[in-house]
Image (cartoon, rainbow, N blue to C red):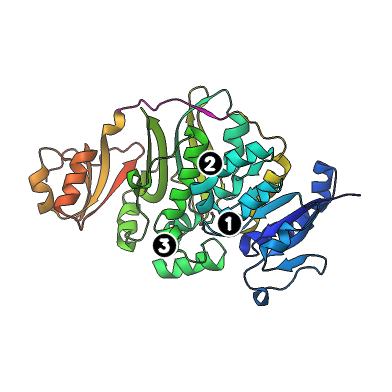
């Protein structure tokens, strides 16, 4: 019987997960696709660092050897960084292969070009694994929200950051210890800078932006902040006030602009992200018909990511060619919002006309209400203070609060 032949680029956590899952789920894959699925080649950087999983697989450091394989049907990209992934996938598409990628950085920057090329060549691109690990957010948007117009997306998209924030709070572990644990679990990138500085979540936001709005904001327009400035003491203060830190990407379109923010915020108990803990990711999609839908599940790790790749494999020929639809976000209620400021009382004095103190949650932390631009000027006046948007309904615990 003929088989569906796959070349796997990369044999790290994701590559291994895909290989193992193709073996463990072979029967189900055959049932779904009508043919056996075979990994015929694996591309690695350094052969000495790996155990060859089978003698029947071409294990190589040379991509040219992969391009010469006859009857190669699918190339799965499980490497990191824009290059060489982008160049390899361009060649694979040109050869008429379908491609599936888990490479968010590459796809954030080159996804649009690869998709145009794939369309011309009549092949498909699967990129479910680039956003939210195993959570089927891309297929939901593409296949299940076709009549709806998408208005806004808010999401926890970096499993490592969420794991660190949860573990520091629950276990009282230090940032460094918790990051080490995230690496051991296979959640963090080999170089975790992208995870903890918000770049990984930013790439995922860019992939969603391109998918939903067929447009991306320019890199300079996006406020991107990671979790590295959050102190254990701030997590404790927040917890005692019933608030939790979450690293969130928000995305909507107004006029011609796509607005995207990637930042840590504090959420109240009523907020849908409050209970999203550990490596879980969560994506809340606001649409005109459905209202809000929230998808949640493991955002990183070997098998959740393999799940996204293999679900893509099944969808390769079924994917709709019609772009998702969106409407502008018109809610103006966010012009004056609540914030938590970790600052000293005297720093608020000059701003008492424009920053309304709603609650004092600690001698060095207040909940305030103010416009974005006022908070920005407060931060310019005191560059060392940390401030976080407060999301979810918040009731002041005291009647009157004075500066
Ligand atoms: N390092 C990523 C994360 C892996 O922690 O979310 C999944 O993209």
Q: Residue at x 50, y 54 (%)?
A: 159
Q: Does residue 296 sit above or below 13 in this rendering?
A: above
Is 76 positioned to the left or the right of 103 in the image? right
Residues marked 3 and 1 touching at CB (< 8 Å): no
Residue 194: within the magenta? no
Residue that label 2 marks: 112
Counting the numbered discs, the total is 3
Question: x and y percent of residue 346 in the render?
Answer: 10, 53
Residue that label 3 marks: 168
- Between disc 3 and disc 1, whose residue precedes? 1
Q: Residue at x 62, y 69 (%)?
A: 45
Q: Which mark is residue 85?
A: 1
Question: x and y percent of residue 273 in the render?
Answer: 45, 44
Mark nearest the camera among 2 and 3 is 2
Check disc 1 and report its element: helix, strand or loop: helix
**Residues shaded magenta:** 323-332
Check disc 3 and report its element: helix, strand or loop: helix
């Amino acid at each position: 019987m003929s088989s569906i032949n796959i070349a796997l680029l990369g044999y790290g956590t994701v590559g291994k997960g895909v290989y193992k899952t193709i073996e463990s789920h072979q029967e189900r894959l055959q049932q779904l696709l009508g043919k056996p699925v075979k990994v015929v080649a694996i591309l690695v950087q350094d052969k000495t660092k790996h155990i060859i999983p089978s003698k029947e697989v071409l294990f190589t450091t040379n991509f040219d050897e992969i391009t010469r394989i006859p009857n190669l049907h699918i190339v799965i990209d499980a490497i990191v960084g824009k290059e060489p992934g982008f160049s390899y996938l361009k060649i694979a598409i040109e050869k008429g292969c379908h491609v599936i990628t888990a490479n968010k950085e590459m796809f954030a920057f080159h996804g649009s070009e690869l998709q145009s090329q794939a369309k011309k060549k009549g092949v498909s691109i699967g990129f479910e694994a680039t956003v939210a690990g195993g959570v089927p957010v891309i297929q939901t948007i593409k296949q299940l929200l076709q009549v709806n117009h998408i208005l806004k997306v808010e999401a926890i998209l970096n499993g490592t950051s969420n794991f660190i924030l949860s573990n520091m709070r629950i276990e009282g572990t230090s940032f460094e210890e918790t990051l080490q644990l995230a690496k051991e679990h296979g959640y963090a990138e080999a170089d975790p800078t992208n995870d903890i500085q918000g770049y990984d979540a930013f790439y995922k936001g860019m992939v969603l932006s391109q998918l939903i709005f067929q447009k991306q904001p320019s890199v300079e327009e996006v406020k991107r902040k990671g979790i590295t400035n959050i102190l254990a003491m701030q997590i404790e203060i927040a917890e005692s006030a019933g608030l939790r830190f979450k690293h969130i990407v928000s995305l909507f379109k107004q006029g011609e602009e796509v607005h995207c923010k990637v930042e840590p915020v504090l959420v109240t108990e009523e907020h849908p992200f409050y209970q999203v803990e550990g490596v879980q990711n969560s994506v809340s999609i606001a649409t005109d018909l459905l209202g809000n839908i929230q998808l949640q599940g493991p955002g990183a790790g070997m098998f959740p990511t393999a799940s996204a790749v293999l679900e893509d494999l099944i969808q390769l020929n079924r994917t709709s060619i019609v772009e998702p639809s969106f409407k502008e976000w018109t809610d103006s209620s966010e012009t004056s919002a609540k914030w938590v400021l970790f600052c000293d009382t005297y720093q608020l004095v000059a701003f008492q006309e424009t920053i309304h103190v709603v609650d004092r949650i600690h001698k060095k932390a207040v909940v305030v209400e103010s416009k974005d631009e006022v908070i920005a000027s407060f931060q310019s006046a005191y560059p060392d203070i940390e401030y976080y948007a407060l999301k979810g309904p918040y009731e002041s615990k005291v009647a009157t609060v004075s500066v």
